[in-house]
Image: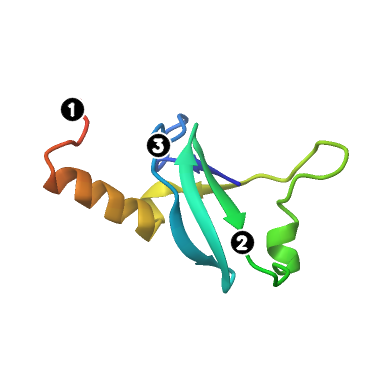
Amino acid sequence: MYGLKVGELSETLQVITEPRPVRGFGIKAYNLTFGGFLWMYFVSNSDPPLLARQAFLREDGSRFICVKNALEMSNLQQFANELGRLGRLPRR
């Protein structure tokens, strides 16, 4: 799970995307964006690397959350381009 900010704004990215197949850390996974977070679900028999596992939910209920700039993520840029092509970008 990654927190998603937009540039220097204090708000998180409020968009919902459908699950998409991806390769996270070289392992088959799905991701979706919801509630200001990018959620990644690994669906492989291979163990994700330690870097990815550090962000997993722990037994005590805690987790480490990395925050990414949504403007630098190619999958969200592609999603925004598709919304623009369809004339569905939000109006300010």
In this rendered view, identify the residue nearer to me: 69 or 51.
51
Colour mapping used in the image: rainbow
Q: Which mark is residue 91?
A: 1
Q: Earlier in the sequence, mark 3 or mark 1?
A: 3
Q: Is residue 54 left or right of residue 22?
A: right
Amino acid under disc 3: Ile
Look at mark 2 in the image and give the residue it sits on: 43
Q: Considering the numbered disc 1 on the image, is that residue within a helix, a strand or a loop?
A: loop
Q: Position of residue 3 (x, y in %)?
A: 55, 41
Crowd rating for badge 1 (residues with CA inside 10 Å; few <14, some 14–19, many 20+):
few
Crowd rating for badge 2 (residues with CA inside 10 Å; few <14, some 14–19, many 20+):
few
Q: CA distance from mark 3 to mark 2?
A: 21 Å
Mark closer to the observer (3, 2): 2
Q: CA distance from mark 3 to mark 1?
A: 17 Å
Amino acid under disc 1: Arg
Q: Considering the numbered disc 3 on the image, is that residue within a helix, a strand or a loop?
A: loop
Q: Is residue 38 left or right of residue 51?
A: left
In this rendered view, identify the residue nearer to me: 52 or 30.
30
Look at mark 3 in the image and give the residue it sits on: 16
Q: Position of residue 55 (x, y in %)?
A: 71, 51
Mark closer to the observer (1, 2): 2
